[in-house]
Image (cartoon, grey):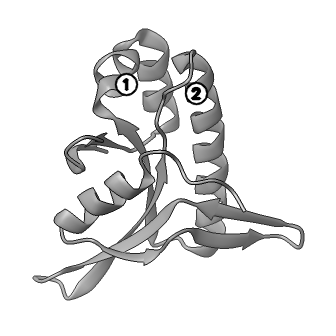
Amino acid sequence: MSAKDRFHEGVKKGLQKEQWVITHDPLRIEFGEEDEVRIDLGAERLLAAEKAGEKIAVEVKSFLSDSALFDFHMALGQFLNYRLVLEGSEKERTLYLAVPIAAYESFFQRDLPQASIRQYQVKLIVYDPVDEVIVRWIS
């Protein structure tokens, strides 16, 4: 079983504060006969006007190692593989990469992360790990 990210519970609480219902912790999806991925969180929210559910999957990252670039390489690879798996089995879910505000305000403003996010259409949730709130949604 994979370890939960250090800020996993904070992101979970932040989503719940925004009226998301956590449906999976983690969201397990099989791919083919041999592979299973575990995306940190699955959540949904009812949209009152449409009476249809909005579903997301969230991969939480802390960016606490000595190299933000290494953390980003790992997170981006994971994100792309998870999106591929979701496209095959849960097309209605939108995948987000959750990153702490400190990493977003520093590392994610650099050229390489910006270009990668645009190129690969990475959707971000920026969270505050101290106050356990979602600061920004970037689609």
How crowded pointer 2 is (Cα within 10 Å; few <14, some 14-19, many 20+) is rated as some
Q: Are marks 2 and 1 in contact (CB under 8 Å)?
A: yes
Q: Nearer the viewer, residue 38 or 32?
A: 38
Sequence-wise first label, 2 or 1: 2
Q: Looking at the rendering, in which quadrant would you find the C terminus?
A: top left
Image point 31% across, 25% down: which residue? Answer: 102
Query: Which residue is the site of mark 1?
Result: 103
Q: Is 28 located above or below residue 137 in the figure? A: below
Q: Is 78 located above or below residue 34 in the figure? A: above
Left or right of 3? Residue 109 is: left
Image point 89% across, 68% down: which residue? Answer: 34
How crowded pointer 1 is (Cα within 10 Å; few <14, some 14-19, many 20+) is rated as some
- Give the Cα separation between the discs numbered 2 and 1: 10 Å
Left or right of 37? Residue 133 is: left
Query: Where is residue 111 drawn, in percent x and y?
Result: 43, 11
Query: Which residue is the site of mark 2?
Result: 71
Residue found at the far left of this picture: 49
Q: Nearer the viewer, residue 8 or 106?
A: 8
Query: Where is residue 75 drawn, in percent x and y?
Result: 58, 37
Q: Nearer the viewer, residue 41 or 139?
A: 41
Left or right of 76? Residue 139 is: left
Amino acid at circle 2: Asp
Amino acid at circle 1: Ala
Element type at mark 2: helix
Element type at mark 1: helix
Q: Nearer the viewer, residue 1 or 93?
A: 1
Image point 38% across, 21% down: which residue? Answer: 108
Q: Looking at the rendering, in which quadrant would you find the N terminus?
A: bottom right
Q: How many marks?
A: 2
